[in-house]
Amino acid sequence: TILNAIDSGTKVGNISMLWNRDLREQGLDFGHFGADGSKTFGFTFEKTDDFKIGSYVANLFMECGNDGVAIAGALKHGDKKVPEPAMMLGLAGVSGLGLMRRRRQRKG
């Protein structure tokens, strides 16, 4: 028997499906594996304030029930988005230019 419904739990967010085109646009390319199936999909979800700290297991089983993938992970306290290096360099550059301008104004 293949159980394809969740028996219990608490929903904390929505899942957005990602199809072939979406995955390609994000840089995913299975071509070098020779995998070019038309039924490839992924999913994404946003970590909201409702997500609790702790470990989790995400799994996906195929319709036949004998092929599956499980991913174990953990949400840690203080997990935050990390600023991009380009943005940090840009801010440092603008700050440096501002300091140079201020020094020139004081000298002049």
Image: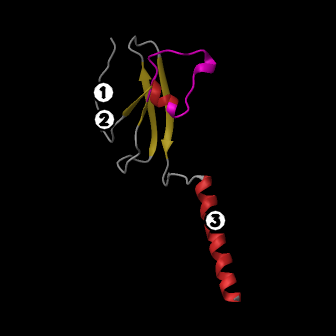
Question: Which residue appears at 61% of the width and 60% of the height?
Answer: 90
The residue that mark 3 highlights is 92
The residue that mark 1 highlights is 6
The reply to whether callout 2 and callout 1 are in contact (CB within 8 Å) is yes
Q: Which residues are magenta?
A: 25-42
Mark 2 residue type = Gly
Please tell me whether mark 1 sits on a helix, a strand or a loop: loop
Residue 30 inside the magenta-drawn segment: yes
Residue 102 coordinates in the image, percent (x, y): 64, 81
Residue 93 inside the magenta-drawn segment: no
Question: Which residue appears at 66% of the width and 70% of the height?
Answer: 96
Question: Which residue appears at 42% of the width and 16% of the height?
Answer: 62
Residue 85 coordinates in the image, percent (x, y): 62, 53
Mark 3 residue type = Ala
Within 10 Å of disc 3 (Cα), the crowding (few <14, some 14-19, many 20+) is: few
Depth order, front residue of 23/64: 23
Please tell me whether mark 2 sits on a helix, a strand or a loop: loop
Q: Is residue 86 above or below residue 91?
A: above
Question: Which residue appears at 64% of the width and 59% of the height?
Answer: 89
Which tag is nearer the camera, tag 3 or tag 2? Answer: 3
The residue that mark 2 highlights is 9
Depth order, front residue of 88/81: 88
Task: Quote the CA–CA distance across marks 2 and 1.
Answer: 8 Å
Please tell me whether mark 3 sits on a helix, a strand or a loop: helix
Position of 15 compared to 107: left or right? left
Looking at the magenta stretch, what is its main secondary structure? loop
Quarter of the figure that contains the N terminus = top left
Mark 1 residue type = Ile
Residue 10 coordinates in the image, percent (x, y): 30, 38
